[in-house]
Amino acid sequence: MMKYLQRIGKSLMLPVACLPAAGILYGIGYWLDPVGWGSNSLAAAFCIKAASAIIDQIPILFAIGVSFGMAKDRDGTSALAGLVSWLMITTLLSSGAVAMYRGVEASQVPAAFGKIQNAFIGIFAGLLGAGCYNRFKDTKLPDWLAFFSGRRCVAIVTALASIVASIVLYYVWPVVYNSLVQFGISILGMGPVGAGIYAMLNRALIPFGLHHALNAVFWFDTAGINDLGNFWAGTGTLGVTGMYMTGFFPVMMFGLVAGALAMYHTARPERKKVVASLMVAGALASFFTGITEPLEFSFMFMAPVLYIVHAILTGVSAALCAWLPVRCGFNFSAGMVDYILSFKAPMAVNPLLIIPIGLGFAVVYYFVFRTVITAFNLKTPGREDDDFEAEKNVKLANDDFTAMAAIILEGLGGKSNLKEFDYCATRIRAEVSDYTLVDEKKIKSAGVPGVFRPSKTSVQVVVGTKVQFVHDELRKLI
């Protein structure tokens, strides 16, 4: 089950990768016309409307992206199936359709059906489309129906399955929606404390790949909060909107960078050179783009106590920013690029305060990380007990992706031992037949930041932001 949920998280990275384009366009538009938001500038209007075309269709992007990502062979037919499922469900369960079923006015239909076009349903439609594709893509029909054999029958089956799903959702969705709304309202009612709880849970759920589900409640319109969309569209409440995004900026731009410095300083002297390469690469990714996985996964499983501390500090940052108040937003993640672009956003409040807050958190992160690491003798990078000889000459900056892929493949036990593999934002995820054939030291000698094994047959190789190129070379070797 956990493996399946992690695959969903990985699949969401494809549609999420579309959001930076919206962020850039929104940022440019608001810089060009910070007062009229497009009404005083044709160029600004074009940028803002173009960005809205992406942000307003996030659920559809999720439906297509998840369906494509969850397909066993990543065929485009699966993406089409996800779109078919989305169109069927949202049409059958729209307020107008439900009003017709019940013979009442649209105003009398439960509010849940007015919010059926949300990220949660998009993900559900994507999973349904992918499930139908994986199950029926090789179906052989009688000669008189042969035209619809194989992949051509997937859309038909998906449509039928979506009708059944819509019948179930007709009764289930109002209950789910009301529960999500109540959870969101309970957090909203807690003000800064609620923002802190959300941010802490966001980090805590990353190891399980479940943070996307939580984000869908607060960042998107699943439960009517839509913090991300309202921040950029200017449709929220000034001083409130953005409180579920702002607290990540001090952590991702400053805190984790200082934490990386603490891990470098506490590494063994003979290992500091290699650790420095890992920490610098991870720190730059975190600071500029808000991609924290290279850093977080470097100690998440090696020192879970430290990761819990990191989650708590993230919650403190979110609560503090919500209380001051400071409001910044992002479309991709809380890095410097999104930070600068959000300055002129309609809902931005005191964005410059992020810098002194971030510097303060950098100090806190450094001393807390260093104290916890040394006090508990945590095995963060460079402090492992195993033989380091195999890693002495590793060059993490190596861009010979073919050579890296060859070493990783050998470390995974070769072609015959590799059942399947894929990649997400920073990791290659592999399933192996015989876990005893996996040589972690060999894999690390390719210059990758880390290797961890969620289960006996699962191996995840943390590569970094260039993971696609290593994955492509690995697929060529296979």
Image (cartoon, rainbow, N blue to C red):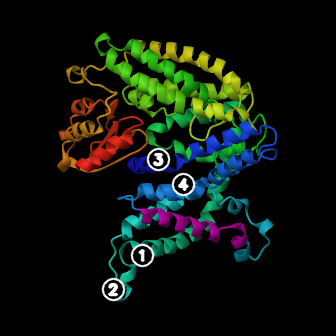
Q: Earlier in the sequence, mark 2 or mark 3?
A: 3
Closer-to-camera residue (342/462): 342
Mark 4 is surrounded, within 10 Å at the Cα level, by few (under 14), some (14 to 19) or many (20 or more) other residues, namely: many
Q: Amino acid at mark 3?
A: Gly
Q: Residue at x 74, y 72 (%)?
A: 99
Mark seen at residue 9: 3
Quadrant in the picture for residue 322: top right
The segment highlighted magenta reads 76-98
Marks 1 and 3, Cα distance to the nearest angstrom? 27 Å
Quickly name the residue at label 4.
62
Query: Horizontally, is 473 left or right of 9 in the view?
Result: left
Q: Position of residue 293 (x, y in %)?
A: 45, 34
Quickly name the residue at label 1.
153
Q: Residue at x 38, y 30 (%)?
A: 301
Q: Is residue 186 visible?
A: no
Q: Earlier in the sequence, mark 4 or mark 2?
A: 4
Quickly name the residue at label 2.
142
Q: Earlier in the sequence, mark 4 or mark 1?
A: 4
Marks 4 and 2, Cα distance to the nearest angstrom? 35 Å
Q: Position of residue 377 (x, y in %)?
A: 37, 15
Q: Residue at x 50, y 75 (%)?
A: 160
Q: Amino acid at mark 2?
A: Pro
Q: Nearer the viewer, mark 4 or mark 3?
A: 4
Above or below: residue 353 compared with residue 174: above
Mark seen at residue 401: none
Marks 4 and 3, Cα distance to the nearest angstrom? 11 Å
Closer-to-camera residue (213/402): 402
